[in-house]
Image (spheres, rainbow, N blue to C red):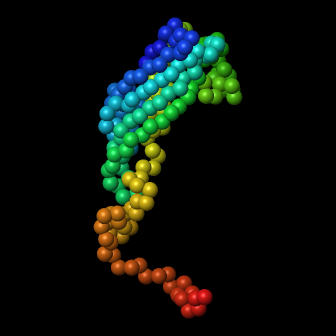
Amino acid sequence: MRVHLDAIKDTGLHLAYEFNPARDEGLADVEQSGEAVFLGPVAVSLDLDRVADTVEVHGHLSAHLRLTCARCLAEFEQDAVADFFCVFTPQPEERRQPTPGDLELSADDVGLLFFEGQVLETDEAVREEVLALVPYRALCRPDCRGLCSRCGANLNTDLCTCPAAPGDPRFTVLSTFKKR
């Protein structure tokens, strides 16, 4: 979303809109890879405040996702929400016509987003935060038992009928010790 700096008054600016992941190239890749399916648009709420020549952005995202459990491979739906904060600052002159040495980030640059002129582009910051909503290792529930390693039965819903695995013969001597 493009925001003109003049639109941010002394009291700040509040924006609420929907971000469609299917129309965003970076997020469409997430769906195509099967990591997650967005079951609707992502609700975005941004509060922008000017502080000197920078703009502070406090954001809130919420999305409804369909995920695949990493343990039992069952599909499930989950709501995902996140709050974030970022700072936009004017593009320094040396970054407009950079030399190879100017492209290095200093400690002061980390966490900053740059803008040129009088317009902020918030889409990249929102895209990064939406990507962070997708869990790295999704679980259908915290106590998911997964799949049987031999027969592939879903241990959350089925009983495994596989015979018990024989113990390691190197440990049979331990069975002769008395239990206290």
Q: Is residue 59 visible?
A: yes
* Residue 156 percent coordinates (x, y): 35, 63
* Residue 106 percent coordinates (x, y): 69, 26
Displayed quadrant of residue 71: bottom left
**Is 93 on the left-hand or right-hand side of 36?**
right
> Which residue is rendered at x = 31% and y = 75% of the image?
161
Q: Is residue 34 visible?
A: no
Which is nearer the eye, 178 or 59?
59
Which is nearer the eye, 28 or 20?
20
Q: Residue furthest front?
A: 11
Displayed quadrant of residue 55: top right
Vertical relation: 42 (above or below) 115: below
> Which residue is rendered at x = 54% and y = 89% of the image?
175
Q: Quadrant of the N terminus?
A: top left
Vertical relation: 66 (above or below) 92: below
> Which residue is rendered at x = 36% and y = 33% of the image?
28
**Is 151 on the left-hand or right-hand side of 122?**
left
Which is nearer the eye, 169 or 109?
109
Vertical relation: 111 (above or below) 88: below
> Which residue is rendered at x = 45% and y = 50% of the image?
137
**Is 152 on the left-hand or right-hand side of 177?**
left
Looking at the rendered structure, the number of numbered marks drawn on it comes to 0
* Residue 180 percent coordinates (x, y): 60, 88
* Residue 40 percent coordinates (x, y): 31, 33
Displayed quadrant of residue 163: bottom left
**Is 56 on the left-hand or right-hand side of 122?**
right
Which is nearer the eye, 19 or 109?
19
